[in-house]
Image (cartoon, grey):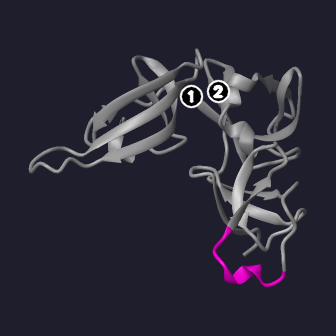
């Protein structure tokens, strides 16, 4: 059992007797005295792919389903889906776009540090790291001296997803992105 206040993005919990992966947590603190802090969880049902929105008190217990995490590597994306390779037995498997809807924004060919989530012997989703290092594919060119301002510009990642980055960055530079907030953290390696 895990308490609702301990559940974070990527946690796998059981909601309505179905395994779900938490995609977002919003903490709501009521202003009234004695009121409980509420945790609004947005999760995805790992069997059906349906979104599940539920609100819990911090001490509410959520059962943890029987599931297995295996390290995998993302290989490539094509019309048939997103192909991964199990790093334990080197078997390949594909997931449909709906199975990796949120995670797909941060996937790059050859990426490791990803875990496959297996329930009842079937891979039903993946868990990506909290931060990933990705190269900027496209953005307007940086101008020398722009580092003194706090202005930002959109930069396109290998998946086609965009994030806001400081104006001084150029295409080809590798940046670190927080996958929980979709925000630029810094240059990779810094």
Q: Is residue 48 left or right of residue 56?
A: right
Q: Which residue appears at 47% of the width and 18% of the height?
A: 18
Q: Is residue 32 left or right of residue 142?
A: left
Q: Is residue 186 left or right of residue 75?
A: left
Q: Which of the 4 image quadrants contains residue 46?
A: top right
Q: Which residue appears at 42% of the width and 27% of the height?
A: 53
Does residue 25 belong to the magenta stretch? no
- From this view, report whether residue 164 is shown above or below residue 84: below
Q: How many residues crowd around disc 2 within 10 Å: few (fewer than 14), some, or many (20 or more)?
A: some
Circle 1 sits in a helix, a strand or a loop, which is it?
loop
Circle 2 sits in a helix, a strand or a loop, which is it?
strand
> Is the C-beta separation of discs 1 and 2 under 8 Å?
yes
Q: Tell me the distance, in whole angstroms, between the alpha carbons under discs 1 and 2.
A: 6 Å
Q: Which one is in front, 107 or 69?
A: 107
Question: To which residue does mark 1 refer?
Answer: 67
Total marks shown come to 2
Which quadrant, please, contains the N terminus? top left
- From this view, report whether residue 109 is shown above or below residue 17: below
Q: Which one is in front, 72 or 140?
A: 140
Question: To which residue does mark 2 refer?
Answer: 118
- Please state the horizontal and vertical placement of residue 77, each as a whole percent of the image: 87, 32
Read off the magenta span: 144-151
Q: Which residue appears at 43% of the width and 42% of the height?
A: 25
Which quadrant, please, contains the C terminus? bottom right
Q: Which of marks 2 and 1 precedes in the sequence?
A: 1
């Amino acid at each position: 059992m895990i308490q609702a206040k301990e559940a974070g993005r990527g946690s796998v919990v059981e909601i309505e007797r179905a395994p779900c992966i938490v995609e977002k947590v919003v903490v709501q603190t009521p202003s009234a005295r004695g009121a409980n802090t509420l945790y609004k969880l947005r999760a995805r049902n790992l069997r059906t792919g349906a979104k599940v929105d539920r609100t819990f008190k911090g001490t509410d217990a959520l059962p943890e389903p029987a599931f297995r995490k295996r390290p995998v590597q993302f290989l490539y994306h094509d019309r048939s889906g997103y192909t991964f390779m199990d790093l334990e037995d080197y078997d390949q498997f594909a997931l449909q776009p709906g199975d990796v809807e949120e995670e797909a924004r941060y996937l790059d060919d050859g990426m490791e540090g990803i875990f496959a989530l297996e329930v009842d012997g079937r891979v039903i989703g993946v868990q990506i790291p909290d931060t990933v290092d990705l190269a900027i594919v496209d953005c307007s060119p940086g101008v020398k001296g722009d580092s003194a301002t706090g202005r930002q510009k959109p930069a396109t990642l290998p998946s086609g997803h965009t994030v806001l980055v400081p104006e001084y960055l150029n295409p080809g530079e590798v940046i670190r992105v927080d996958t929980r907030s979709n925000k630029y953290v810094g240059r990779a390696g810094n």
